[in-house]
Amino acid sequence: MDAAALSRKGIGCTFAAPSKTIETARGSNQFPEIGQALNRQQLMSLSPYLSALLSQNIVVALSPDWMAVCLISEAQWNETGPKYERLAALSEEIRRRQRVQLGSSYLLTPDQPLIIEPWLSGVTSLTGDDLIISVDEVYAELWSPTRIIGPDRLIIGTSD
């Protein structure tokens, strides 16, 4: 979906992102075997941006800035990675950011379950009654409501 086809509806919107703890059959090494499973189709129905993001390969990683799980399109991830590498010699902060994201990242294709590994769920305090913040067609974040400052100021969207 190109940017012209996307409306402004859904940018920066917060939606409920319920999940459940699951354990898949052993040997499914292409995605986490245990973790918080989100309903990809349900999330895609919430906004055009989430639909565009979740219909492509995504990288799941810990945010280097705050305790949230990032969902990043593989194309955006591949574009951003080399920029970090060029900047790595400039700043300890850039190197830290790179280690955090690279060390916690894994790739999921659209046909794989959207599972957040237990380590990521734990460090970000995801509970199953979490929120997804849609930024654009290449980036979204999963947040625990307990980690958001001023949750009373959030406006929770619907798929209407």
Image (cartoon, helix red, strand yellow):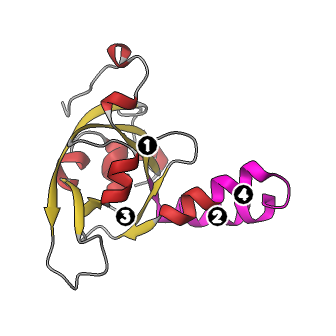
Vertical relation: 19 (above or below) 9: below
Q: Residue at x 46, y 41 (%)?
A: 67
Real-space CA distance between mark 3 and mark 1, rounded to the nearest whole angstrom: 21 Å
Q: Was residue 86 drawn as part of the magenta stretch in this picture?
A: yes
- Where residue 81 is drawn, which disc sits there? 2
Amino acid on which the number 3 mark rests in the picture: Gln
Tag 4 residue: 95
Task: Determine whether the residue tagged by mark 2 lies in a helix, strand or loop.
Answer: helix
Real-space CA distance between mark 1 and mark 2, rounded to the nearest whole angstrom: 19 Å
Q: Which residues are magenta?
A: 71-98
Q: Mark 2, mark 3: which one is toward the viewer?
A: 2
Ranked by sequence position, the earlier of labels 4 and 3 is 3
Ranked by sequence position, the earlier of labels 1 and 2 is 1
Quadrant of the image occupied by residue 119: bottom left
Q: Residues within 10 Å of mark 2 (few under 14, many from 20)?
A: few
Quick one: quadrant of the C terminus?
A: top left
Quadrant of the image occupied by residue 143: top left
Tag 1 residue: 68
Amino acid on which the number 1 mark rests in the picture: Ala
Task: Determine whether the residue tagged by mark 1 lies in a helix, strand or loop.
Answer: loop
Q: Residue at x 33, y 51 (%)?
A: 121
Task: Answer whether residue 131 is visible to the viewer in this image.
Answer: yes
